[in-house]
Image (cartoon, rainbow, N blue to C red):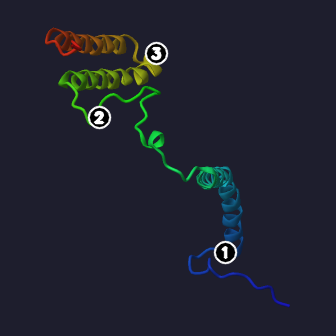
Amino acid sequence: MRERTSVWYKPLGFSNARAQSCAAHVIPMLSAYIPIAIFVVVATGFALFTLVFSGLIHSEKYNKVKLEPYECGIEPVTDARDRYSIRYYLVAMLFVIFDVETVFMFPWAVIFDKLALFGLIEMLVFIFILVVGYYYAWQKGALEWA
C-alpha cells in the first residue's frame, strides 16, 4: 500500500525531509506558548466566575443608604459636584509634572556605571533644572493651599 503524504511543500520546492524538519521545529516553538494560553484561560475564567458569582449573591433591594455617595465612611456634607479652588488643580499638576520627571531617573540609575562621569554631570543638570522649576512654582505661590 502506498503511503499518503501531504503535498503542501511541493510548490515551495521543499523536499519531504525538509518539510519534516520544519514541522519538527514548529512543535517546540508552539509548545512555548502553552503557559501563556493557560494564563489567558485562567484569567478570563476568573473574571467571568467573579462576575457571575457576584451577580448571583448581590442584593436586589436598593435603599437610601445604598444609593448615597461613599466618602471613606464620612457622611457626605455637600453635593458631589462642588467647585474646587484652582489651587487644588495647580498643586495636582505640579505633582504630576515633578513625579513624571523623576521617572526618568530610573533608567539612568540602571546604566549609571556605563555612563560614568558624563552621566553624573548630566543628571546633576537635570536635577538642577527640576529644582529651579520647583523654586519658581514656590515663589509664584502655586504651592500655597489656602
Label 2 crowd (10 A; few <14 / some 14-19 / many >=20)? few
Element under disc 1: loop
Is residue 44 shown above or below 102?
below
Q: Are marks 1 and 2 in contact (CB under 8 Å)?
A: no
Compute the Cα span from label 1 to label 2. Answer: 77 Å
- Between 100 and 89, the one lying in front of the other is 89
The part of the image, by quadrant, that contains residue 89 is: top left
* Among numbered discs 3 and 2, the one appearing first in the sequence: 2
As shown in the figure, which amino acid type bears the numbered disc 1? Answer: Ser
Tag in front: 3 or 2: 2
Is residue 137 shown above or below 15?
above
Residue 75's spot in the image, x, y percent? 41, 28
Residue under pointer 2 = 79
* Among numbered discs 1 and 2, the one appearing first in the sequence: 1
Q: Disc number at residue 15?
A: 1
Label 3 crowd (10 A; few <14 / some 14-19 / many >=20)? few
Residue 107's spot in the image, x, y percent? 42, 24
Q: Residue at x 61, y 80 (%)?
A: 10
Residue under pointer 3 = 113
Label 1 crowd (10 A; few <14 / some 14-19 / many >=20)? few
Q: In the rendered image, which quarter contains the C terminus?
A: top left
Residue 113 shown left or right of residue 27 in the figure:
left
